[in-house]
Amino acid sequence: MARITAVSFDADEIRVVTGRRTRSGFIVERSLQLTSDQLDAFLQHDRAQEYLVAVNPENAQFETITIPPVETKLEATLIKTEAARLHPELLPFSCSWRVIGDLPQEGRTVRKVACCLVPHQSIEPVLKTFTRHGKPISRLVAAPVALAALVRSVANLAEPLLCAHDAGTSKLLFLLEDGAVTFSRTISSQEPGWDLFDRQNVAMTADYCFQSLRVRPSRVLVLNPASELDQDGPPPRLEALQLPESLQSGLAPEIMQQYQVPFMLAAWPLPATTNLLPDSYRSARLQQTVLQRSGQLFAAASIVLALLIIQQLFVLRTVTAAINELQRQQTGLSEVFQAHRSAVSERDQALPVLSVISGLQAAPDIPGTMVAIDSLRVPQTSINTLVARRDQESLSLQLSGTVTATSFAATQERFEALQSALQQIKGITPGPYQLDLKTQAFTIEVIRKP
């Protein structure tokens, strides 16, 4: 399986998870916390086949827009156009989205879409870091979007949820409506865990969602609690997300606590609509892939051509050796050629006579055939005429006669008896025949071969 490296750019550190996807899940090989300089050194020596990156820039904008219900292939154009109309100050930007559903609005049906807009100036430093080391990024995803996939897999999404992720000295909060991220913010924190200051920030975020977004979260889910949450602490009440057994088995607890974002990015395949890579970057990567494949094909073709040239040189050497051997034997072939010419001349002189004799012996004997036919004794039948024609290797016969039976059935029976008697003669093959039951006349064509 291909080796994967997932990188998450958090507020305080860069977290990296490397491993391989298997049929049963994702196997973590290494987990690292790096600085920017350490990331450069890591990328310089890393040999992964695929790179996945999660970012959470401060100027990322989560917006809910509406578009007309259209085919899936037209959604991208309409979503980007509507987002650019609403937020021209972010241009140029990358856009990821998730369709919430079709809803009635003012007498018509519209499609509600949750978008994540990230200006290119915020993600270009990340792209340059990987490009500098020749590591193309396969997918660039907003961190809340990656975490939302985890929540969708285990939580009840019937009501809005406020999700909280502990990144150490910062906390990531995002609002989840119908499985889509509609609001996100990052708050500073003094230490890992959820102290009074953090709870106050969570409470203010929940109030903001109700007052400004008109959405009241039904509960607050903590995605990666470092320890058991204090349910007797000040409000709001924090609930720990119950992870599925498939994500807990075989994993060290610190993976899901400290490296949750890169792990989910690597272990949980996300749809193409979550990708924030700019179109220009994707085009350049496609061109690079085409050039690499072309180079590989050219190298393979060169190797095959070189092998063919070596083979042809070997064949040429073998043929040259055979020609030299034949030239050495040429001196003894003159007498053989002369004897062959004499034998061919004698054969040509005797060939006409042999052909005549062979033709006479190959064709059937006409008198013998007539005697064999005349010896036939089939009651109530008589052969009146016999026409014979000799071919090169066969004798064609046409027999005409009559049947003197008293009824049609008897006539047919006597005629078939005559046919059976003809077939008893060696070398005779029956051919077309005619029998007139009224006149009782018949005609039979047969061929006799020796």
Image (cartoon, rainbow, N blue to C red):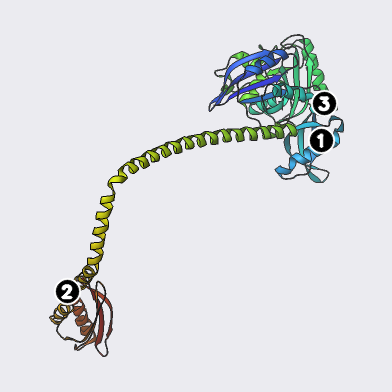
Report whether 290 appears left or right of 12. Answer: left
Residue type indicated by callout 3: Phe
Q: CA distance from mark 1 to mark 3?
A: 23 Å
Residue under the point 76% across and 36% down: 113
Which amino acid does the dot numbered 2 rest on? Ile
Q: Which residue is mark 2?
A: 425
Instruction: Judge the density around disc 2: few (<14), some (14-19), many (≥20) Cα neighbours within 10 Å.
Output: some
With respect to residue 83, does 109 lie above or below? below
Q: Which residue is mark 3?
A: 210
Q: Earlier in the sequence, mark 1 or mark 3?
A: 1
- Apparent side of residue 104 relative to residue 404 in the rendered image (left or right): right
> Within 10 Å of the Cα at label 1, are there few (<14), some (14-19), or many (20+) other Cα atoms?
many
Residue matched to label 1: 83
**Cβ–Cβ below 8 Å for labels 1 and 3?**
no
Report the residue at 83% width, 44% height from top: 106
Q: Position of residue 120 (x, y in %)?
A: 79, 28
